Every structure is written in C-alpha cells, then in structure tokens.
C-alpha cells in the first residue's frame, strides 16, 4: 500500500485514487473507457441481482416497522453498499467483495473528500429536511395523545408541519455541504 501524496490528493500517486482519475488515465493510454464503464456497471447490476432477495427482505423488515410507527410516511430505508472492483491486465473487471457496512474511516484528505461527498449525496438523495422530521414527530405525538386520551378527545396540533425545500448547496465544498445539512433550521 502506498499512501497518497498530500499535495497530489490522489491524482497521480498512491494506492487510492478517484475513479475519475483512473478512467482519465486509461483514456489517455488509448483504452475504451465507455466500454469498461459499461462492463463494470453490468457486473455491479448482476451482483446486486444475486443479493436482491436478501436486500428485499431487509427493506421490507425495516419499512414495515417504519410503516407501523408512522403509516403515512414515505419510507427512506436504504442500504449503502461498497464494491471493491479489481481490473486485471486485460482490463476485465472483477468484484473482489461487497461490503454491506463500508468503512467511513478517513485515512487521508482524499478519503475525507470522497466519503464526505458520498454521505452528502446519499443524504441529499433521501430528501431529508428538519421539517419532515418535525412533521414525523408531530404525527407520533398525535398518535400518542390518541392512545392516552382516546380518539374522540381534541388536542392541539403543530402549526409548522409544512416541509420547506432544502437550501441550495451546490456552490459549497463537500464538507460545507455536509455541515449545512446538519445545521439547516
């Protein structure tokens, strides 16, 4: 294992590199990068298909629990998978392993940048906002009050239940975007 050069940030040195860096390097050497990307995508899809029944069972187990606690809430159940792919000397891709709990430990600035961006993109794709959380908690409180006081008793409801769009963060660095998600009012 060769540690990345701090100044280079994984562009030309070290064992860890960005996928885009590797693809640019292969393209510069005259390799058919779009074909390689299709091969990798096909291999990953086939791998996911083989573990599909397990993923479906896990999803249904988690989403049924969520639906029981808040029936009108959209499910945001997901699993983040890490694929280790190796290219042989003929540029044939091979799946080495699939990590169902990939590590988010950051050993270098490149790790920090890539993993922060991954987490930001994952959370952003879930369309989470504090307002959705407040709405969910208000529904839970309403259900608790119904259980405590009975279905016919009136009670106060939260006035701030409308979700607002997330703030635009495309102009920020990945670490700033991540923190803005966590600190959104």
Image: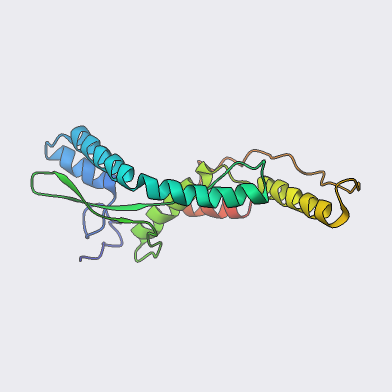
Q: Is residue 108 above or below residue 60?
A: below
Residue 113, given in percent of the width and then of the height, sits at 40, 55
- Residue drawn 20% across the image and 65% down it: 2
- Residue drawn 34% across the image and 48% down it: 51
Horizontally, residue 64 falls left or right of residue 152, namely left
Q: What is the residue that sits farthest to the right in this orientation?
A: 153
Horizontally, residue 69 falls left or right of residue 49, namely right
Residue 60, given in percent of the width and then of the height, sits at 50, 47
Total number of numbered labels?
0
Q: What colour scheme has been applied to the protein in the rendered image?
A: rainbow
Q: What is the residue that sits farthest to the left in this orientation?
A: 89
The foreground one among 55 and 36 is 55
Residue 152, given in percent of the width and then of the height, sits at 90, 45
The foreground one among 22 and 90 is 90
Quadrant that contains the N terminus:
bottom left
- Residue drawn 91% across the image and 46% down it: 154
Residue 86, given in percent of the width and then of the height, sits at 19, 52
Horizontally, residue 89 falls left or right of residue 126, namely left
Q: Is residue 115 visible?
A: yes
- Residue drawn 89% across the image and 49% down it: 155
The foreground one among 24 and 132 is 132
Q: Is residue 173 visible?
A: no
Residue 31: which quarter of the image? top left
Q: Is residue 160 above or below residue 103?
A: above
């Amino acid at each position: 294992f060769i540690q990345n050069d701090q100044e280079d940030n994984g562009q030309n040195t070290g064992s860890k590199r960005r996928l885009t860096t590797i693809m640019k390097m292969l393209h510069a050497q005259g390799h058919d990068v779009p074909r390689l990307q299709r091969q990798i995508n096909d291999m990953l899809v086939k791998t996911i298909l083989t573990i599909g029944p397990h993923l479906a069972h896990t999803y249904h187990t988690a989403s049924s629990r969520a639906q029981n606690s808040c029936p009108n809430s959209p499910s945001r159940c997901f699993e983040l998978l890490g694929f280790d792919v190796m290219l042989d000397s003929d540029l044939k891709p091979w799946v080495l392993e699939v990590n169902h709990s990939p590590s988010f430990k950051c050993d270098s600035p490149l790790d920090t940048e890539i993993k922060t961006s991954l987490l930001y993109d994952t959370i952003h794709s879930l369309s989470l906002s504090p307002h959705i959380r407040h709405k969910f908690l208000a529904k839970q409180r309403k259900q608790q009050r119904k259980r405590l006081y009975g279905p016919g008793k009136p009670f106060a409801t939260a006035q701030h239940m409308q979700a607002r769009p997330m703030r635009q963060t495309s102009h920020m660095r990945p670490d700033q975007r991540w923190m803005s998600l966590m600190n959104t009012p």
